Amino acid sequence: MPTVPRWASAAAVASSVAAALLVTCSTSAFAHDTCKAPGCAAGEGYHGMPEIATIGARTGKYMDIPEAAKGPAIDAAKGYRLQQLGRGLYMVTENVYQAMFLVHDRGVILADVPPPLAAFLPQAIREVTDKPVTHIVYSHAHIDHIGAAGDFVANLAKKPVIVAHEETKAILARAKDPKRPLPTLTFRDKHILEVGGQRLQLSYHGNGHEPGNIFIHAPEQRTLMVVDLIFPGWMPWRRLALAQDVPGYFAQVERIKSLDFDWLVSGHVARVGSKADVLAQHEFLLDLKAAAGKALQTTPLAEGMDPRDKSNPWAVFDHYIDRVAAQCVNTLTPKWAPRLAAFDVYIWDQCFTMEQSLRLD
């Protein structure tokens, strides 16, 4: 694992801090060029600074979305799109969020109830069947994927069975959120949900996003639903989709890569995914890890710093990490900027996250 260079000698932290520091920075577009007070932004970036705007800097025009990342258009009159993935299995999306439902002999199993889809899900299901929703499966506890479950269940004549991992139930019990009703059926490692001639295989593989995030596999339909891990055609959401365990995130992408399926419902973006999308994201992650690792090993500590700041270890390390991330961004941009939608939006996030994981995990 890459190691961080050590300071040549232990730096003493300043023994006192000024009781008050009046900083008069211009709020104009020229603030970076005119402000010389301590704490203000320098007038120039680091050597070899990427052209892609850093976190906190305003972007004038984001990169165009590659055609391969786009999905079929949404019917404006409906507001959503329904796609059949196999016998009785459908994905619903408004081209940002995705849910999935499986029709069985006696009703419907719904996987996730994202608030942006809440108004569309009843109509989408009625397009296919008038059978009742008998089960709801939670992919995980995050409100953006199940935060409409409370209202959805309240409008049903009969309460469905809500299935989730036991970690998800623990998180929701702590949250006490009526928008996310507690599961009524939980499992630890695996659960087979077999109802009315249809089958879903539910499994848990650890904390790759947050505790309780499960795999939902429809084997007959050759479809896998895993939310917030793979983003078909797109850069993952910031900080590797807010992964709580970065090595766990990498391990789960490896796990998905090894499975046999044709369709991937990822919970986000405008289209379903494929094995090719998983392979592409896996390749990007390996490149990200290699780029951050090399930058950690080859970036000199404190190079170019104001000598007066070298007694401030926080400042020395911030200066180092920023330059590591910049090198990582520069390394990845030529190959991946044309291939991944929103590369420029979150590449700085990914490089900062990766260098931190390599140093600390």
Image (cartoon, rainbow, N blue to C red):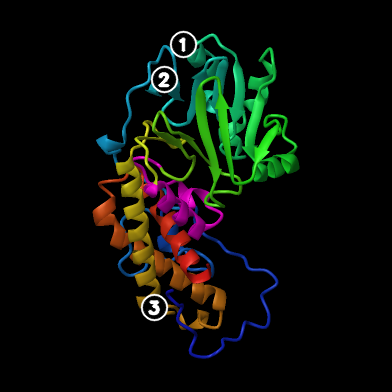
Q: Nearer the viewer, residue 64 or 297?
A: 297
For residue 250, what is the image quadrant? Answer: bottom left
The part of the chain drawn in magenta is 231-258
Up-down relation of residue 142 to residue 117 (above or below): below
For disc 2, the marked residue is 82
Percent position of residue 14, x then y: 63, 82
For disc 1, the marked residue is 127
Q: Counting other residues with Cα less than 10 Å from the Cα at mark 3, is it few (<14), some (14-19), or many (20 or more)?
A: few
Q: Nearer the viewer, mark 1 or mark 3?
A: 1
Which secondary structure lies at badge 1? helix
Q: Residue at x 49, y 64 (%)?
A: 357
Q: Secondary structure of the magenta portion, mostly?
A: helix
Percent position of residue 306, x then y: 45, 79
Q: Residue at x 28, y 50 (%)?
A: 337
Residue 222 part of the magenta segment: no
* Mark seen at residue 304: 3
* Amino acid tagged 3: Gly
Left or right relative to 113: residue 44: left
Q: Residue at x 52, y 36 (%)?
A: 201
* Amino acid tagged 1: Glu
Q: Marks 2 and 3, Cα distance to the nearest angstrom?
A: 56 Å
Which secondary structure lies at badge 2? strand
Up-down relation of residue 72 to residue 254 (above or below): above
Mark found first going from the N terminus, 2 or 1: 2
Left or right relative to 107: residue 231: left
